[in-house]
Amino acid sequence: MNRDERFAHIAKLNFNTLDLEKKNSRLKLLPAIHEIYQHRSMLGLLIRRDLKSRYKDSALGFAWTLIRPITQLAIYAIVIGKFLGAERGIPLFAIYIFTGLTLYTLFQEILTAGTSSILANASLVKKIYVPRELFPLASAGTALFNFCVQLAVLLVASALFGNLMVTTDLIYAVPAVLVVVTYGLAFAFLLSATNVFLRDIGYLVEILAMILMWASPILYSWTMVRDTLHAAGLDWLVTLYTWNPITLAVLGFQRAFYHNSLHGLETPEHLGAQIAIVLFTGLILLWLCHRVFRKVQGNFAQEL
Amino acid sequence: MISETNAPIIVRLEHVSKKFTLRKDNSLKERLLIARAGAKHKVEFSALDNVNLDIKAGSTIGLVGHNGSGKSTLLKVIGGILDPSSGKVSRRGRLAALLELGAGFHPDLSGRDNVFLNAALLGLSRAETEHVFDDIVNFAEIGDFIDTQVKFYSSGMYVRLAFAVAVHTDPDILLVDEVLAVGDEVFQRRCMDKIHEFQADGRTIILVSHSAAQVQELCDRVIVMHRGKPIYDGNPEDGIRLLRAGYERDRLDAMQADDRVALGPHIRSIRVVSDDPLEDITVSRELPLSVAFEYFLPAEESTPPVLGLGFDTHMGQTLRGSSTKDFSLKVPKTAGTHKVVFALNQNPFSLGKYSLRGVLEREDGTLLDHLTPASYFVVVPAPGESEEEEVTIDLQLLSSEPL
């Protein structure tokens, strides 16, 4: 392209304008999505960078992605299941906890890696303009990759224990994963932005993730909670407990891969409808959190 | 080139301001503890103050100014890296920002992976990167190291690769912040050639630089920033003169604030007198030179003090000096501030930059104060005189023989 061609080309382009007088010019959703879509190849590269650099220079490399969840599975199954006797009433306890953990790990990774993503990429944020959403999104992408690996382990383990079967309940897996991704991303947007201005958020999130794990029916069953609380006359607490989006997602995921009904474990009556409602709420939350993110992202470079 | 009328506007800033709030606390505890005193802990600082600017495609603009004048902030606002606090920023065309070389490099990834990642960060698709990949590797002179992790690169290889990626991204606007001085001389020459090639292609370059020589070599327009406002916008020669004058003023201000000068007899300033409105620093070569010497005496001295005056080249090489004692000149000895102007019988200096220094002594040789360097001045060619010194070299043939 020579000088005159370039000038002609530029003269035809529309201005990309940021007008601070019009408050919402940066907050609109569609331009933001369009911008992210334009940078989709970069998103892929960022995810690959995270994955490649994670186990670089280690002899086992990607095998570590498998070793960690398998060890976790063994510890929970032996210590909590056998020694603490938690497997009473839950057949195939190892598969049960691994099903819940697989989904929960996805949420936890999106949340914690997403929250620190802007700080972790400070050198890029300060020096180059790319839509900043890419960083939490890339964290989510990395988490999804790890989730797929873990899911494969789960399926293999299920097959070994003779629990691998295709039922109509399999359909629950899709909204369950969507709920986890939606809420994880919503909080990742909100907290990664907040974390830039207040570094305590990063530590707070780790604790929150731990509380949320124990607040979902992963290492125990939903029926245990329901019966205990019912006996104590705290039925409202059961409702509250059940409406936790992560609880619902975990229950849906267990229905799809663990087949609760086959093992005599109940799930809430209207699980499908409840998951649909929290998914819809989650999408609204995601939109709101993204707005907050957009609003403050212009100040990232100066705060880092 | 500024007057080029057919060039479209590529960047437009309207009433752009940027305020920073400086806070000292950054953790929850600190914020809670001083929540009530919060307002006191905030210091507002205006980095850009109502800047209006049009940049035409194809121009090369130098943003200059002192540290903290807002030039880097302006560059980041143009690049979309920082949002302004108010105002309107419009921009079009592909933009590449070279604010820090290798900002996106990941030490654990190979050079090849980093090239693709960095190119994507600068807006190139995978196919486009593949197309220029060999050029990048050749330009950076990386060779077989391209598949080595960049943490094993020498710092030279690192910046060469980063620069090579940046200049191969086909930007319409290139933002450069103090990064052109990388690599050895040969590589620097190639960087400069690449920049000149960019200019010929009609790309717009906006660069922040402290190097007057670089700005003069590359730019066709200079914007001098001062306290968040452009105080000059025009041709590079005047812009750089103004900038130098500004540095000079700052230095003198700092010197006056120095507590050394608050007490006792001291030299206030020594400067070349000139009609030039630009802070007395340029003197034409053909005019006689006068120097104003200001000093302060807290009490009347018994004998007139001795003022010594010396000249150094910009590099610090001492040229010559003389004092009032050498010529038996009597200067005021009463208490107060005095200004004495000396005339030099002719301007003995060739073109270039010089510094002035001075001493204030009693007649018995007791040193009262000295000031080194006191100020700078630049000797410029007289109107009509050429920039080059006229030196004729005569060649004579001594011998010639077949070998």
Image (tube, rainbow, N blue to C red):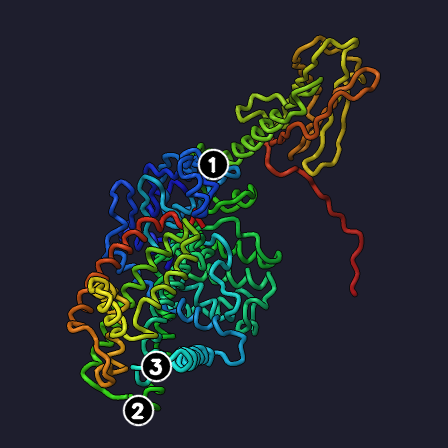
Chain of the residue under label 3:
A
**Which amino acid lies under the numbered mark 2 shown in the image of this protein?**
Gly
Residue placed under numbered mark 1 in the picture: B224
* Secondary element at image label 1: strand
Mark 3 to mark 2: distance in Å? 18 Å
Residue A90 against residue B400 in the figure, above or below: below
The one nearer the camera, A113 or A39, is A113
Task: Quote the CA–CA distance across marks 3 and 1.
Answer: 74 Å
The disc label shown at residue B79, or none: none
* Residue found at x 32% / y 39%: B86
Q: Residues within 10 Å of mark 1 (few under 14, many from 20)?
A: many
What is the secondary structure assignment of the residue under circle 3? loop
Query: In this orientation, does residue A205 appear?
Result: yes
**Residue B222, how many percent across, how many down?**
46, 39
The reply to the same-chain question for discs 3 and 1 is: no
Q: Residue at x 29, y 88 (%)?
A: A163
Residue that label 3 marks: A87
Say which residue label 2 marks: A162
